[in-house]
Amino acid sequence: MSWNQADTYDVGGYSIYRATSGTIATGLELYERIYDVNVTSYDDSAVTSGETYYYYITAFSTSGEYESTATTTKSETVPITLSAPTTGTTTNITYNSATLNWTYSGTNHQGFIIIKSGDSSGIRISDASARSYTLTGLLPSTAYNYSIQAYYGTSASTASNFSQFTTSAYTAPVGSPTVPSNLNATADVNEPKIVLTWTDSSNNETGFKIYRKYGTQNYTLIHTTVAGIQTYTDSQLLDGTLYSYYVTAVNSAGESIPSNIDSDTTVGEAWKYFTVTYAGTGDDFNMLP
């Protein structure tokens, strides 16, 4: 920090006062006098990453008998410095799940962010002691790359090395239904919903399971139908968002392998607005989309 020299001949030096962010509103009396200097700058190194500190300066006379009024208070937040985690061996790999493991030697973090290759954001874990995370909703026989970041507030470390693994194949149980085919996802043009259709390729299912993903999510089960159904409308979705789906057939023997994956993007926010056009006389009017 630095300041202008006091405009008086009898200046012996300057006193630096400091408070933490929790005391600024309660008055200058809670500031602590941390150092006296005879120059017009000072480096405060006794600080903690992420903490906000408040300061004011006074000038004192050469005899030390008199002290000026305080300067205007100023604040500064110490930047967060976070080291990158190190990923270890991925364990417990199945056809739809895997456990990521990592080590971390830092201490000034709030948690970790799990980032899949190709995604701009990730899964935030608000547990600073976490050293593993189990991914679910993965696809069979699929290669994945994940990295880990440590975070504090809005600050994040550089990413770790990639953890690379491939899920195992899925073998449908004997007697389970034939996989559905020709899955098609079509976004509605008027509101944010997506209509799914597929072909029922079996004659022994008790229903169909519908799985969905969007953003950085993996696939999750969103609905189970009864037998014979070949369509489903997924409504109340986010505006302008890409959604991906697959469907399986199920019965008492188990679940089929996944169908093909299909995706579509919901209509944007403009669907919420309409034009009111006045027509005729009196209080009559028409609402035109």
Image (cartoon, rainbow, N blue to C red):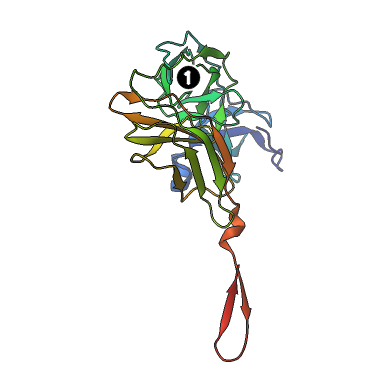
Image quadrant where residue 44 sits: top right
Residue at the image position 60 percent from the left and 91 percent from the top: 281
Mark 1: few/some/many CA within 10 Å (<14, 14-19, 20+): some
Is 181 drawn above or below residue 149 in the view shown? below
Image mark count: 1
Q: Nearer the viewer, residue 17 or 6?
A: 17
Q: Is residue 41 left or right of residue 154?
A: right
| Residue 99 x %, y % | 42, 16
Q: Nearer the viewer, residue 24 or 15?
A: 24
Q: In the rendered image, which quarter contains the C terminus? A: bottom right
Q: Is residue 74 visible?
A: no
- Viewer-proximal residue among 160 and 172: 172
Quarter of the N terminus within the rendering: top right
Task: Read off the residue under disc 1.
Answer: 140
Determine the residue positioned at 42% across, 33% down: 220
Question: Residue at the spot x=52%, y=15% of the render?
Answer: 85
Q: Is residue 134 left or right of residue 269?
A: left
Q: As rendered, which of 81 and 249 lies closer to the eye?
A: 249
Q: Residue at x 48, y 12 (%)?
A: 105
Can you name the residue that lies furthest to the top here?
89
Residue 133 screen position, x and y as percent: 42, 20
Query: Where residue 117 sits in the image (x, y, percent)?
Result: 59, 23
Q: Position of residue 283 (x, y in %)?
A: 54, 88
Q: Secondary structure at mark 1?
A: loop
Q: Residue furthest bottom?
A: 282
Identify residue type, mark 1.
Answer: Pro
Q: Is residue 41 above or below residue 169?
A: below
Q: Which residue ends up furthest to the left in the rendered image?
A: 252
Whether residue 111 is situated above or below residue 284 in the rendered picture: above
